[in-house]
Image (cartoon, coloured by chain):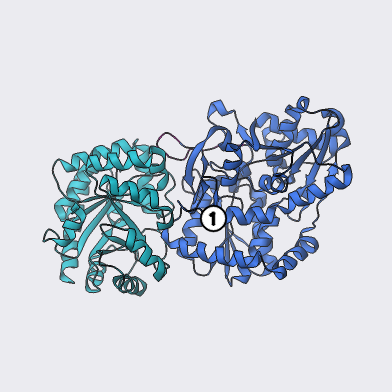
Chain colours: A cyan, B blue
Amino acid sequence: MGRIETAFTTASIKKPAFIGFTVAGDPDKVTCIRIARALIAGGTDILELGVPFSDPVADGPTIQKADERALTAGTTPDTVFDIVREIRKESNVPIVFLTYYNIVHRRGIERFYREAHDAGVDGILIADMPVEESEEVCTVAARCGIDPIFLITQTTSEERIKKISAKARGYLYLVAVLGVTGVRDQVSDGAIDLLHRVQKHTRLPLALGFGISTPAHARTCARAGADGVIVGSAIVEIVGRNLKNPDLIEQELQDYVMGMKQAALSGQ
Amino acid sequence: MTTKGRYGKYGGQYVSETLMSALIELEDAYGRVSKDPQFARDLAALQTEYAGRETPLTFCPNASRELKCKIYLKREDLVHGGSHKLNNTLGQALLAKKMGKKRLIAETGAGQHGVATAIVGAALGLPVEVYMGEVDTQRQALNVFRMELMGAKVIPVKSGTRTLKDAINEALRDWVANVRDTYYLIGSVVGPHPYPLMVRDFQSVIGREAREQVMRKEGRLPDAVVACVGGGSNAIGIFHPFLADDVELIGVEAGGEGIETGKHSATLCAGDAGVLHGTLSYLLQDEHGQVLPTHSISAGLDYPGVGPEHAMLKDKHRVTYAAVNDPEVLDAFKFLSQTEGIIPALESAHAVAYVKQNADRFDKDDIVIINLSGRGDKDVAEVAKIQGCL
């Protein structure tokens, strides 16, 4: 059983899980490690790390800027693997990469997945890799002991939900909005419908992400039966607001995650 | 890897999940219309009555004398709007209407595709929004005005390098958010399947006409066909009907300030395999897979990727890809203007520059067709500025 599955099925996560995202290397390697620590200290059950890319087409302005900051700081896949190794020295929290295919393709699928696994990564989601193109990646992932994580969106047909659920491991990432990443006012009815639609087809844990930022959002997702809530842009905004003050980033993030986790639990 | 939409190993559909249903819908719809005789008739009528096809294959006596071979120009500069771009936008906008889409979005570099989309939007009654890099809105201010004049909304893109690549990123983000009623009208043979196929089909009218025209005028096929390559739509359009023939095909990329300086857009000459904007093709990228900034004197070629079919044609050695640099392009721009009274777009001037530079490769009876993909009026102010005349 992988770390992700264990996290969802055993008592180590009180459901719904809080899944926190930050861009690896944003604003630099050292601060990013402190950010990860703060997220974990606040109660993050699964840590998602964005591997920065020059052209992140699935992301809104907040995460685009974070990718730019990370790249300007000289972040490469090697930096990102280093960050994972540092976190692994002190934590067993499952770690998932979010990236774009060219980063993986450039390094070589086999090499990227092998190095990721050796550093301590548990799952990889490639934002521009639909299930139809994923055969090779899934084969390599299985061989390397990495869970392939997939997105399901409001426009995904029933037929494709089945196809994706059959290939995915770890959890399914349900996209709560039509659009790119970024903070939104509320969790749409479409998101809850999607959750119920996917529940019929799979026993994999279902996590809702994109546009989720407030405790009220987390409660709504939990009440609807989500196994996890994923927060990205709201975390990255806290980072972006306090670039000159890493101490403040840590404090704010830890408080924020605690509030979100509590809200999610209260909705259960 | 699926076999669908593949050119050798290149092509495919590398997009986020939200867009998959839209691509499947588009594939189905295009599959239907491409077999529908009524669609073909509607498109042909628009091409003739509205766009001004067929375009001439013009023999150039003066340029031929100077370059010591027989030079013909395929006159896509005479298509309504001033470039080959309308061939594609007419086809795709007709398709969008058939699909019941309510809104067109597009990206543009030099502004030619944006203008061609604004034209079809006005003609077919669909609202148009065009994403354009902020740098390009300044380089091509006149085209911004043209688009707005025809009722399109131009959205300057301020992210990344603020050029064509970033305009495509923003258009993709818009499409993800509005996928149910919006049609993304891509301007070149790039992007995920079925775009490279569809755009090629709509642009192949160039090569079909040229092939017939040269047979009529010369009674034989040409020795060479030369076209500029950015994304590669005018090139694939003129090459495709000649692929099975014994005709040399030459694609000319933007060498910018020289490939060795790193300031260029010569993807096929200097890039290698990578994935951008939904397709696996050649890509200008660093060792870690980050996409590199590009440079060209012509905004329309300023793109780090290229159509996947070109990638295959390069690997199969069916098409020769070369690059010419900015100064040679400016020379060719002047050369064609002075010898023939035809001002080429800076993009098309790359093809002219290649022939001029390699004229000694051809004999005096050799027939060389240059695809004059667009007219140069849009570039006159920029060239005057470079020469210090403005």
Q: Nearer the viewer, residue B356 or B6?
A: B6
Look at mark 1 in the image and give the residue it sits on.
Answer: B193
Q: Residue visible at 88% across and 42% down?
A: B218
Q: Residue visible at 39% across and 52% down?
A: A135
Q: Residue visible at 76% across and 59% down?
A: B51
Is B294 one of the magenta-colored residues?
A: yes
Q: Position of residue B213 (x, y in %)?
A: 84, 48
Quadrant of residue B367 within the rendered picture:
top right
Is residue B277 found left or right of A100 in the rendered image?
right
Q: Nearer the viewer, residue B368 or B373?
A: B368
Quadrant of residue A149 within the rendered picture:
bottom left
Chain to which mark 1 belongs = B
What is the total number of numbered labels drawn onto the structure image? Answer: 1
Q: Nearer the viewer, residue B87 or A35?
A: B87
Q: Position of residue A74 (x, y in %)?
A: 35, 35
Q: Is residue B340 above or below residue B84?
A: above
Quadrant of residue B343 within the rendered picture:
top right
Q: Position of residue B302 (x, y in %)?
A: 58, 41
Residue A251 appears in the picture as rendered: no
Span shown in magenta: B286-296
Q: Is residue B348 above or below residue B150?
A: above
Q: Please name the amino acid that badge 1 sits on.
A: His
Is B353 one of the magenta-colored residues?
A: no
User: Magenta-highlighted stretch: main secondary structure?
Assistant: loop
Q: Residues within 10 Å of mark 1 (few under 14, many from 20)?
A: many
Q: Residue visible at 85% across and 46% down?
A: B215
Is residue A192 found left or right of B360 in the rendered image?
left
